Amino acid sequence: MQKLQLWERYKNRLYHHSELDLTVDTSRMNFPDSYLEEMEPRLQKAFEEMAELEAGAVANPDEQRMVGHYWLRAPELAPTPELAEEIQATLASVKAFASSVHQGNIAAPDGHRFENLLIVGIGGSALGPQFVADSLGGAKDRMKVFFFDNTDPDGMDKVLAEIGTGLPRTLAVVISKSGGTKETRNGMLEARQAFEKAGLNFAGHAVAVTGSDSELDRTASQEGWLGMLPMWDWVGGRTSVTSAVGLLPAALQGIDIDQLLAGARSCDQATRSRVTRENPAALLALSWFHATGGKGKRDMVLLPYKDRLILFSRYLQQLIMESLGKELDRDGNRVLQGITVYGNKGSTDQHAYVQQLREGVPNFFVTFIEILKDREGASMLVEPGATSGDYLSGFFQGTRSALYEKERESVTITVREISPATVGALIALYERAVGLYASLINVNAYHQPGVEAGKKAAGSVLKLQGEILEMLRRQPNRDFTCTDMAMTLARPEEVETVFIILRHLAANPAHGVGVTPGDKVWENRFRAE
């Protein structure tokens, strides 16, 4: 297609939200002019399902739960006055707690103000807060933010080393809906030990964000933690960033959470439109459906041309892949759905994988995110008439054109600047696009049975590990190969798992397991020491 023809298509397809100064450009998606009309009946059904969801329908039938993350930025839409009041009260509590910490009214046990913030969570309880913290944080932050977002001991040691002597002035926020998520529980226990080793009372540094009467809620109550804020069963982890899960860390960091919510609210209003061309989330969902054939046939490559958005692709990986990656549709048919998401940042992408994107396997479509404002204040000229930011914009435009020349399709989302409002809008835009796309392909976007299956499998491994340790301690003078151990435990079918467990136990001194190398690694002999 010639450039002037593309310009006409650009003008015809460009969506612009004047209040947010946000545009969505689908002109580089090669669907025909008739595509939107052909998809209109399916999309109108998706709009209807979304309206029912927002009205309080049980949109997650597997768990018999409502899905209410949209109410978090519009409490008046909640299906009952009680829910609306609870949302508003929680937001007020978040603000009051953060203000008290900043003013020193809630302080460390030694009386000093808290200066550091340690967030303990995993999945949606970490990815959303991390994205917000990284995209909106800076030198003027009220508190410096750190994360325990995995059950990796070395990773936690690294974070604790970075906090260093600042631990006495560190506030820990532990986030877990059930309170029983093992990764978060382990992070809390590791944090507790670090505080206690430093002679500090963990309860005097700790806040919980959790479900009512959860294991974590009971622990925080019994130990007298500094505060507790709710998580509701109608908010999924991957859509929880505009609840206390994301708002409390953001407020403590010093981010304007009112503006974050206002941006999300404005985008929610726009994405409720049932006029397809006036609904940016619908345009995204239709672009995804076209690009993937409605079957996930192509990957989504996210390329934000802004360092502050480097974590956006990681955040969207969970939001999109956990929501859409399903074996069964809502009718029980085996469909194997999903969209794979990965990304880097521009223009780093040009020195990483744009070569393959342009000339290699065409199994993807791109989402560019363009930020118009380069920085606060004026930039220096790196050469006559051009700044560093001009080069970034040039590389974005060049990459977009170079890919389209090779028939690689793309969507471009543009915002004027990175601010709490635009970050909130981007979050809301993708939440709605995921919900609409899930309706188009008839999957339940709000459950995650595959995640639960992995947790159950991990539990079985740890149960077997307990049996292995017990056997080693009962026979301290005996050396076991993995085959010996599997046979002794009457679990011959688990010999591979036994070997992996024994090898890990021997590498870590806490378990007191020694190893004598065999001729082959699987012939190693293990014993209690």
Image (spheres, rainbow, N blue to C red):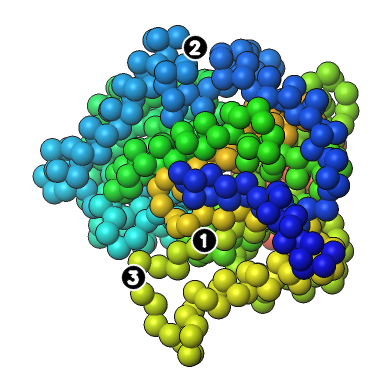
Q: Looking at the picture, how far across and down is residue 281, in whole percent?
A: 64, 38
Residue at the image position 75 percent from the left and 29 percent from the top = 43
- Sequence order check, earlier mark of 3 and 1: 1
Identify residue for label 3: 377
Please tell me in which quadrant of the rendered image residue 80 appears. top left
Left or right position of 8 against 93: right
Q: Looking at the picture, how far across and down is residue 177, in whole percent?
A: 48, 27
Kind of residue indicated by mark 3: Gly
In the orientation shown, which residue stands out farthest toward the bottom?
384
Residue at the image position 23 percent from the left and 45 percent from the top = 200
Q: Is residue 153 above or below residue 434?
A: below
Q: Is residue 474 above or below residue 368?
A: above
Dot 3 surroundings within 10 Å: few (below 14), some, or many (20 or more)? few
Marks 3 & 1, CB-CB < 8 Å contact: no
- Sequence order check, earlier mark of 3 and 2: 2
Identify residue for label 1: 371
Residue 518, visible in the rendered structure: no
Closest to the observer, 523 or 327: 327
Q: Is residue 347 above or below residue 525?
A: below
Identify residue for label 2: 79
Closest to the observer, 371 or 499: 371
Location of the N terminus by quadrant is bottom right
Q: Looking at the picture, how far across and down is residue 465, in whole percent?
A: 65, 38
Dot 1 surroundings within 10 Å: few (below 14), some, or many (20 or more)? many
Q: Nearer the viewer, mark 2 or mark 1?
A: 1
Dot 2 surroundings within 10 Å: few (below 14), some, or many (20 or more)? some
| Mark 3–mark 2 distance (CA, rounded to whole Å) | 45 Å
Left or right position of 399 against 143: right
* Helix, strand or loop under label 2: loop
Check residue 395 in the rendering and tell me which mark sits there, or answer none: none
Number of numbered discs? 3
Kind of residue indicated by mark 1: Ile
